[in-house]
Amino acid sequence: MRPGRQPAIAREQLVRWTQMLVRHPSPQTELFERDPQIQSFIGETIVALADELALPWRRDAMGNLLIELGPQGADRSLMLMTYAMTHPANRMRAPFAGELIEETGGRYVRGRGVSEQKGALAAAFAAVKAAARRRDLAGRLSLVVSTAGETGRHDAAICACEALGYIPRLAVIALGTDGRVALANKGRIDVVVTVRGKATHSSMPWAGIDAIAGARRVLDRMDALDLNGRRHPELGTATLTPTSVRSWPDATHTLQDEVRLVLDRRLLPGEDPEAAFAAIAASANAIGAPWQVTVERGPFMYPAEIPSDGVLMQAVAGGRRRMGLEPPATFHSHGALDAGLFCARGSEAAMWGPGAVAQWHSDDERIAVDDLLVGAASYLGLIEEYLCP
């Protein structure tokens, strides 16, 4: 679907920006937000784009880029939060070429992260540039390019909000959602359980304490753990899933004296991460002697939920009508991102943007040019509807 009213950005420019973003690799590594490629993507490519568009920018302590427009201290405030970090290239052919593909169904930009993060990032810049030309912004508009994107934690978003000095009233987490708005998403807390025993040669297992056997008991207890019994009408129940098992010493013929488990506990809207962690810790510690158990909190993200008739959804629907578009479809996500942080702090926030979820992390990731245009028009419509009443 093409918008009835185009934002003041030419199609060719939007395609060029999207290709430029793809051509600067910014994949997730073990350095996360501190990775030099992430920092240079923002410091070089994003800064160059902001300068080209004459948009005022600054960077915070984590390297996030912040663009702010409109009156300070206004009652209304809207943030578009975008992301620099993408999934690694993996097996994708020419992941950073930014190819423009012509097919029967239309034109597509191909590249790593283009459907998940970078298409929505380009669309957000197009919308904010168009909004910057207006003189009647009645509220504060911020565009954040976060150094995160694949980290599974709120650190970068918290840093950006601290630098801005406020929590926006409305926030859009700009990434590919098939153009649908996520009315709710699960949160997540990672829990690291370490089971320690005593190493010995595997020919004499009775002389040691098998940490693997202790870890098996922990996993059995996790299977039996009551996850509070709640059920969300759309998201179902909470889940607890082991995502990593490692043991030491890394040597042959040796009874293992340490096993480290990582558990992924998904949180329903309204659940307390602290209570979820405490229940897991109590159950794991209950295996008792002869093992020693330690339980640590890993990264976490709050769950999110907004009303289908709330301020954000009304502004989204009204903005789409301004652009000659129907109100967007909605969905509920089992994934976790930064919308939960804003909801936990009193905002209305949701994931929403151009790009197909099915393309995320795929070996042929791409986004339709028409979807980029609709995404830019939709973001501009939201800005005008909420901040230019």
Image (spheres, grey):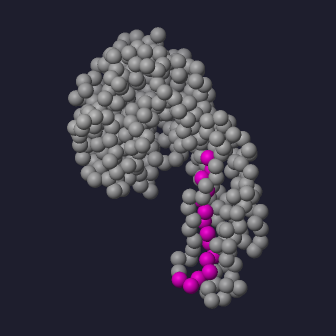
Please give the range of residues in magenta.
252-266
Judged from this view, the residue extending furthest toward the bottom is 203
State the count of labels: 0
Q: Position of residue 284 (x, y in %)?
A: 72, 61
Report the magenta stretch's main SS.
strand
At horizontal 34% and vertical 30% (from top left) the residue drawn is: 371
Residue that appears at 74% across and 51% down: 226
Residue in view at x 47 percent, y 15 percent: 318
Residue 111 point in image, percent of width and height: 30, 45
The quadrant of the image that shows the N terminus is top left
Identify the residue at horizontal 24%, vertical 24% (top origin): 10
The answer to which of 70 and 192 lies nearer the viewer is 192
Within the magenta stretch, is there residue 73?
Answer: no
Residue 82, percent across and down?
A: 42, 35
Q: Position of residue 118 (x, y in %)?
A: 36, 38
Residue 258 lies within the magenta run: yes
Q: Quadrant of residue 191?
A: bottom right
| Residue 151 visible in the displayed image | yes
Residue 70 image-quadrant placement: top left
- 155 versus 120 height, above or below: below
Please say if 159 is above or below 217: above
Q: Is residue 35 visible?
A: no
- The residue lying toward the viewer, choosing from 12 and 237, is 237
Viewer-closest of 379 and 198? 379
